[in-house]
Image (tube, rainbow, N blue to C red):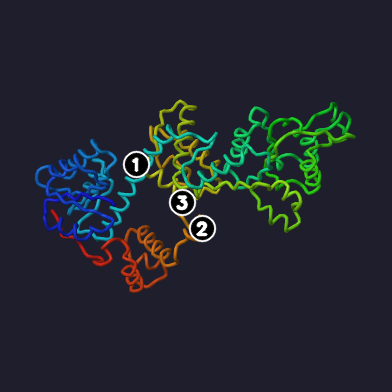
Amino acid sequence: MSRILIVDDEAAMGEALIDALSSSEQEVVFKTSADDALRVLKDEDFDVVVTDLSMAGMTGTELCQRIVSTQPDVPVVVMTGFGSLETAVQAIRAGAYDFITKPSDLTELALTIERAAKHRSLGREVKRLRKALAETKRFEAMLGESPAMHELFSLISRVADSEATVLVSGESGSGKELVARALHQGSRRAQGPFVAVNCAAVPEPLLESELFGHVKGAFTDASSTRAGLFLEANQGTIFLDEIGEMPLGMQVKLLRAVQEKQVRPVGGATEIPFDARIIAATNRDLETLVTEKRFREDLYYRINVVRIPVPPLRSRGTDVLLLAQAFMQQFATQSGKGVKSLSAPVAEKLLAYSWPGNIRELQNCIERAVALTAFDQISIDDLPEKIRDHQASRFILETQNPAELLPLEEIERRYIAKVLEAVGGNKTLAASVLGLDRRTLYRKLNRFDIAYVAQRSTDSALPTGS
């Protein structure tokens, strides 16, 4: 539940706001002076303070300055009956989160308070994650607090000490090699070598020699015998990244090596046994490739003894902020800059973005932000333009669990509320975006009880203050 402190020396204003804004999700406390507000702020916690600008005694600007100096994480919204650029600048300079002119549309005020409360919540989450980063025990090189990552860590722990071949699947940049290294470090082969090869990066004519080695004179440039990566990985682990890109002709030879635990070097007459665990990874749908005859079915079943799916970054919730904090500390140390935190608006942008490039893209984003910022806190201006200006435009289904799926009516309710917030409470514009007439929109707002009680007093004005 959010707690809102209203400060105004007009009793009628306070009563109107308490009636309008109080709900099961919000508690509203009203005080008639800045001094009373400061006293209650010492003893109680509030998510947002809404204050009138012109009051007897201490003004709203002075109150805002006092709150910002002692409780900078509490956003202050300033209201005034004399809206002008000068008064708006005065309020913002005092540290106000936002500025509203009376008489205010209840919807506009409710949405401003909601945004301010979200701003504080994100600020708290950034602080919590900064502390958690120092206290969190990393799973090898991986960080994560989300349920998806806890499930991944559990699966790695159960599989690590097995000799079974593992297929790690996931989108590009999601951390598949980190999973492979964690499997190696958790196995009885941890003291042996970890040998990685990207099957898509080696030209097809050289891939067989790279994996299996060659004997002297096997081809023009073979001036000496070379062991190959499978033999280099003896007593350890070989990691075959992007195995879905391997040519079909090479897949036949790999299948034999996996089955027999032996390799025949290019130009060699005998097979050489090897003792290495095999971990493969792909960002492709191998089952589809099998159906399309572009990946051998028998090889697929040989490498897919245990499958470990790596979740995309967009499905990991606030892990985005945890990772961003870790990258920020890393790059700040490397560059010698005193960057210490992410601002709440930055946290909101990072959480809203879908991260098609996953962890790799986030790392690039934070490295750029640390390089550009001139302050000890990363701001929105330091983010890449596509993240800074991103507007969510697609629906992402992040679960396959039927128990966690939402009814269509709930999805509609949330989407209407999101559109209303995005257009600043303008119902005419919201109706246009949604493709509805105003009467239909009003029926839906009443039906879904959207935007607090504002929809039951649509477009009503608050009492005019001084």
Going by the image, does 382 lie left or right of 218?
left
Location of residue 281 (image quadrant):
top right
Location of residue 42 (image quadrant):
top left
Image marks 2 and 1: residues in contact by CB distance under 8 Å: no
Q: Measured along the vertical axis of the image, is residue 315 above or below residue 411?
A: above
- Disc number for residue 390: 3
Q: Nearer the viewer, residue 363 or 58?
A: 363
- The first of marks 3 and 1 along the sequence is 1
SS class, disc 3? loop
Going by the image, does 185 lie left or right of 464?
right
Depth-wise, is mark 3 or mark 2 nearer the camera?
A: 2
Name the residue type under label 2. Asn
Image marks 3 and 1: residues in contact by CB distance under 8 Å: no
- Disc number for residue 124: 1
The structure residue drawn at horizontal position 26% and vertical position 48%, both measured from the top left corner, is: 48
SS class, disc 1? helix
- Disc number for residue 401: 2
Going by the image, does 180 lie left or right of 112?
right
Real-space Cα separation, disc 2 to disc 1, in angstroms = 30 Å
Q: Measured along the vertical axis of the image, is residue 77 above or below residue 333?
A: below
**Is disc 3 surrounded by few (<14), some (14 to 19) or many (20+) residues within 10 Å?**
some
Name the residue type under label 3. His
**Is disc 1 surrounded by few (<14), some (14 to 19) or many (20+) residues within 10 Å?**
some
Q: Position of residue 177 (x, y in %)?
A: 62, 39
- The first of marks 3 and 2 along the sequence is 3
